[in-house]
Image (tube, rainbow, N blue to C red):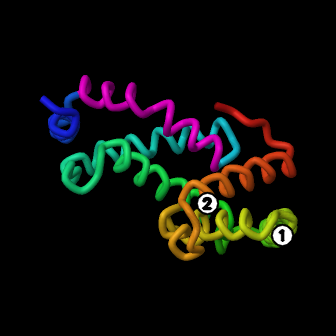
């Protein structure tokens, strides 16, 4: 039996809710998803949460896996990438909710939070602008606009490897600028 067929059978078992199948899937891809989450999100605790979210989503959509369209690793990493992008977007735009029966103190706190968000966004923008053009553009297109590395490579008429390297170097520089420790 070939790997493609084994992957399809594994995903059918995951779709049926078989714990052993989900454990097998996690054993195969859990560390890769986690390392990727750490790289993208920059926080071990957030990466742990995101990794769990990814596998819950994989479990919920397991019946949709089609081995003729993508390898299992590609499918899992695509789900991961989408979830990480969603987390980054949510982090950038966190609405502040205010209850009508809360006093002026809470409104002042919300204004303070808004100021912190604006200040944080300005810092991120400044740090992004300090990156070389290619690195900045690749990070923006992949993480903020949702393009795949292949799409960015086609847009820039460059090899995918060059785009992947620019992304990696750019994320590394941002981690350095924000003083984040690198994991994985």
Residue 29 belongs to magenta span: yes
- Residue located 66% across and 36% down the image: 44
- Residue located 65% across and 48% down the image: 41
> At which x and y percent is residue 105?
83, 66
Element type where label 2 sits in the image: helix
- Residue located 72% across and 63% down the image: 135
Instruction: Tell me if residue 83 comes above or below residue 181 in the rendering.
Output: below
Dominant secondary structure, magenta: helix
- Residue reaching furthest left? 1
Q: Earlier in the sequence, mark 1 or mark 2?
A: 1
Q: How far is mark 1 from mark 2, CA to CA?
A: 18 Å
> At which x and y percent is residue 121?
79, 68
Q: Is residue 102 left or right of residue 147?
A: right
Query: Foreground: 162 or 143?
Result: 162
Image quarter where the C terminus lies is top right
Element type where label 1 sits in the image: helix
State the mark number for residue 163: 2
Instruction: Tell me if residue 159 comes above or below residue 27 in the rendering.
Output: below
Residue labelled with disc 1? 129
Q: Is residue 134 left or right of residue 143?
A: right
Query: Foreground: 49 or 133?
Result: 133
> At which x and y percent is residue 164?
60, 54
- Residue located 68% across and 57% down the image: 166
Image quarter where the N terminus lies is top left
State if disc 2 and disc 1 touch (CB < 8 Å): no
Region rendered in magenta: 19-40
User: Between tags 1 and 2, which lies in front?
Assistant: 2
Crowd band around label 2 with a 10 angstrom C-alpha radius: few (<14), some (14–19), many (20+): many
Kindly indicate the quadrant of the structure image that contains residue 137.
bottom right
> At which x and y percent is residue 131?
82, 63
């Amino acid at each position: 039996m070939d790997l493609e067929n084994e992957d399809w059978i594994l995903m059918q078992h995951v779709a049926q809710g078989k714990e052993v199948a989900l454990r097998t899937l996690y054993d195969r891809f859990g560390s890769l998803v986690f390392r990727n989450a750490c790289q993208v999100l920059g926080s071990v605790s957030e990466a742990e949460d995101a990794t769990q979210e990814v596998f819950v989503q994989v479990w919920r959509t397991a019946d949709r896996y089609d081995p003729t369209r993508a390898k299992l690793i590609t499918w899992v990493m695509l789900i991961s990438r989408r979830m990480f992008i969603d987390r980054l977007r949510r982090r950038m735009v966190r609405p502040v909710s205010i209850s009508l029966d809360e006093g002026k103190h809470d409104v002042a706190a919300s204004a303070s939070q808004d100021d912190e968000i604006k200040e944080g966004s300005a810092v991120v923008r400044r740090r992004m602008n300090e990156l070389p053009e290619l690195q900045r553009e690749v990070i923006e297109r992949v993480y903020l606009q949702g393009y795949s590395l292949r799409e960015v490579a086609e847009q820039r008429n460059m090899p995918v490897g060059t785009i992947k390297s620019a992304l990696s170097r750019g994320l590394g520089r941002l981690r350095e600028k924000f003083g984040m420790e690198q994991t994985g």
